[in-house]
Amino acid sequence: MAVAALERILPDERATAELGEDIAAALRTGDVVLLEGDLGAGKTTLARALVRALADDPQLEVPSPTFTLVQTYATRVPVAHVDLYRVGAPEEIDELGLDEAARSGAVIVEWPQRAAGRLPADAATITLSDHGSGRIARVSGPQPFLARLSRSLEIRSFLANAGWRGASRTFLAGDASARGYEVVSFPGRPDRIIMNAPAQPPGPSIRDGRSYAEIAHIAGSVHAFVAVDRLLAGAGLAVPEIEAADLDRGLLLISHLGDGTFLDRGEPVAERYAAAARLLADVHDRTWPQSAPLDGGTYAIPAYDRAAMLIEAELLLDWYLPFATGKPVRDRDRADFRGAWNTVLDRLAGCETSIVLRDYHSPNIIWRHDRQGRDRLGVIDFQDAVIGPAAYDVASLALDARVTIPAELEQATVESYAAARMAAGPFDHTDFDTAYAIMGTQRNSKILGIFVRLDRRDGKPTYLRHLPRIREYLARTLPHPALAEVRELYARFGLGRDAAS
C-alpha cells in the first residue's frame, strides 16, 4: 500500500499522547524515528507517551534524556530514547551505540538536526509545529513505516466511529499469523479487543494453480471469523461478541473474554483439560451446517479435504527435514511420503466429521474461573474452521503444541472426551482412536514444519524450543496400526522411534 507523508492535527496534550500510542502500535525492531520541532513543541510529550505505551504502563517514569543523552527501556519493542540537544560535537554520537540499539530494538531521537548526518538516511521523521491553539504532526519516512503507521491511525478512526473516541490502546498479542490484537480501554467501561486482520493475498501458486493458503483453506479475511463466531455463539459456546466490524478493512471490535490463562503458571491442569475435552464432546454431539449466514449472504465452511491434509503434512518435508538433516528432501522421499499418507488417509473413510476449530489448544482457550459450565471456557482463534474429522481437535487439545502434556494426562483428556460422548449416545471408540492417531500425526507433522518455517522464513526462533515436544508426540501416535506406512517412512527420516528422536 503506497502511503504519502502523513499529517495529524493534535488539538491538546491528550491528542499528542494518543499519537504516541498509535506510533507505538506501529513500531518494529529496526525503526529509527526522529522528532523535530522547536522547544516546547511536544517532542518529549510524544516520546514519553510512546515509551509508556510500549511498556503498557501509563505511570512509567520517562525522564527527558537531556543530560544522559540516551535512556533505554526493556519494553515490548526495546527502545532507546535519545536527546541530542546537549551534544557538544557530532563525533560524540558515534559513542552512543545507536546502530546496535536499532538492531535490537527501536530508536527515538529528539533534536536530530544536531547529528550532522550521523543518523540513518531511511529514518522516519515526525515534525511538530504550532497549529492554531494546538499542534500539527507531519510524518515522513520509509514506506514500510508509513504503511504501518497509516494502519494504526486507521484503527484509531475505526475506534472513534465505534463510539470509543479517546480510548487507550495496549498491545495484547501477535503470534504466528498476520493478525494482531490490542486491548481497548476507557474509564468506566469494560475493556474490548481490537482484532487487526487485514486481508491477506493468497500467495504464489504452488500446485494445480492454487496457493498453499487456498489448498489448506487458510482464511484470508475476517469474514470467516465473523461467520464462525456467530455459528458457535448460536450453539452456546463462549466466543467473543462482535461489537463493531469493518470487514473490508479487516477490523473487528470484540468483547474481552478475560485474562484467565488455561494453564497454571505455565503448567497443564488436568481438570481444565478434561473440561475442554467435554466441551468438544458437546460440539461433536450436534450436527453442523456446511455454511453460515454472513451479512445477507453465506460463508461456506471449507471441507478439510485430502488436498488440505496432505499439503499441511508436507510442511515436514519443506521445512523441518531440511532443517534437521541439512539436506534437501529427495524426489523419491517426497513421492514415498505422498503415497504413504494417501494410504493412511484412506482409513479415515467413514470416520465421524464435525466442525473442526483447528487450533483448539491452550493459547486459544481462556479459563474463566468465575463462570460455570460451558461459559467457563472462552474460545478464540477459529477463523480457519473446516468440516472434517472430529478427532482432530481432540488431538490438538490432548497433544498441546505449546505445553508438554504427559502421556497420562493425554490419556485422561481423551478418556474425558470419550466418556462424555458415550454418555450422550452411541460412540465408536475404535474408529475414534484410529482417527485420533492419524490426525494427531498429521497435525504434529505440520507443526514441525510450521515452527521451523517461523524461524527460517519469519525470523521467530523461539518456536524451535517446541520441536522436541512435537517429536515426542509423534512417537506416541505413530505406533497405531493405522499408521503403518507412515511409521515406516518416518523411521527412515529418524522420526517416531523414541522420545529423543
Image (cartoon, helix red, strand yellow):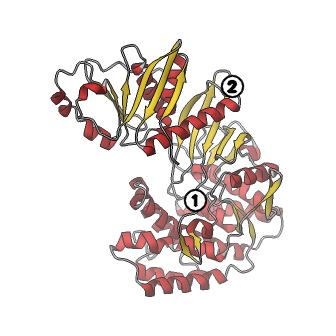
Front residue of this view, candidates 50 and 275: 50
Is disc 1 placed on a helix, strand or loop?
loop
Point out residue 355 in the picture as x, y percentages from the top left corner: 73, 63
Front residue of this view, candidates 382 and 458: 458
Residue 189 image label: 2
Question: Is residue 110 toward the left or the right of residue 276 in the image?
Answer: left
| Amino acid under disc 1 | Pro
Front residue of this view, candidates 44 and 492: 44
Q: In the rendered image of this protein, does residue 371 appear above or below residue 318?
A: above
Point out residue 494 in the picture as x, y percentages from the top left corner: 40, 77
Q: Residues within 10 Å of mark 2 (few under 14, many from 20)?
A: few
Q: Residues within 10 Å of mark 1 (few under 14, many from 20)?
A: few
| Amino acid under disc 2 | Arg
How far separated are the C-alphas under marks 2 and 1? 36 Å
Q: In the rendered image of this protein, does residue 496 appear above or below residue 56?
A: below
* Residue of label 1: 201
Q: Give the residue displayed 51% in from the left and 67% down from the top.
A: 473
Q: Give the residue displayed 34% in from the left and 41% down from the top.
A: 122
Question: Is residue 86 toward the left or the right of residue 435 in the image?
Answer: left
Q: Give the residue displayed 64% in from the left and 61% down from the top.
A: 358
Question: Is residue 156 toward the left or the right of residue 86 in the image?
Answer: right
Point out residue 438 in the picture as x, y percentages from the top left corner: 61, 75
Q: Is residue 262 visible?
A: yes
| Mark closer to the observer (2, 1) | 1
Front residue of this view, candidates 485 and 310: 310
